[in-house]
Amino acid sequence: MKVTGFARFALLEKLDDAMQKAEGTLMKRYLAAVENLPPDEKNEWHKVRLRMLQVCETAAAKHVGVLIDAEETWIQEPVDALTILMMDMFNKENVVVYNTLQLYRQDRLQFLKDSHTAAVERSFILGAKLVRGAYMEKERDRALQLGYTSPIQPDKASCDKDYNAAVEFCIMHIDKIAVMVASHNEYSNLYATRLLY
């Protein structure tokens, strides 16, 4: 499921920008960003949350998973926060909600570890779908145009290193993480298999 399918892109950008400027944990930054929205946009975001809640409730009732797709870096923060909120509600006994982590991003391995910490603290099971990524050219072009450091790994070896480290982290914490190794990479798939035995 793509949150951009039922949330206005510009609203996600606005929330992400506010979250980037705030301090604290992901959830503290999220709550502050939502609180500072004007009333009409706060109401609009409330409707986005309700839509996502309805999807997750239906999935839970039907015993199926919901895979929340990853988005561009400049709108990902509110998507991550909303996904964590849904996991906190629906992933107590079984895993319903999975977040997609694009490991071609330099920050995602740490985000995985931080998400695991949140899961332990809030007593939910983290759902993690591990992918390499989909927006490499767009991300690099935007970073170059706007003059900030690219969020993308410098090379494939770095991406592979973080991807395999994420696979290992998830399997080493399998009691609190339900992981999907979504890869076409033969080594990563064999590595996951070896770690499970």
Image: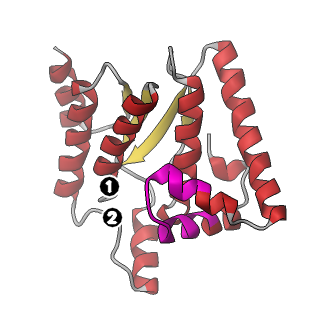
Question: Residue 78 in the image: x percent, y percent?
Answer: 57, 54
Image quarter of the C terminus: top left
Q: Any magenta on residue 20?
A: yes
Above or below 16: residue 59: above
Q: Any magenta on residue 186?
A: no
Q: Which dot marks residue 122?
A: none
Image quarter of the N terminus: top right
Question: Residue 15 in the image: x percent, y percent?
Answer: 62, 63
Question: Residue 87 in the image: x percent, y percent?
Answer: 53, 31
Above or below 69: residue 174: above
Residue at (51, 20) in percent of width and height: 92
Label whose residue precedes the other's in the sequence (2 or 1)? 1
Question: Residue 53 in the image: x percent, y percent?
Answer: 70, 34
Say which quarter of the image contains residue 125.
top left
User: Which span is picked out in magenta?
Assistant: 15-31
Q: Secondary structure at mark 2?
A: loop
Residue at (61, 13) in percent of width and height: 63
In this orientation, which residue lies closer to the viewer: 26 or 82?
26
In this orientation, which residue lies closer to the viewer: 9 or 126?
126
The amino acid pointed to by label 2 is: Ile
The amino acid pointed to by label 1 is: Tyr
Q: Residues within 10 Å of mark 1 (few under 14, many from 20)?
A: many
Q: Magenta region, mostly helix, strand or loop?
A: helix
Q: Secondary structure at mark 1?
A: loop
Q: Which dot marks residue 104?
A: 1
- Residues at circles 2 and 1 in contact by the CB criterion of under 8 Å: yes
The reply to whether residue 71 is visible in this rendering is: no
Pointer 2 residue: 152
Above or below 83: residue 136: below
Above or below 64: residue 185: below
Q: How is the image coloured?
A: secondary structure
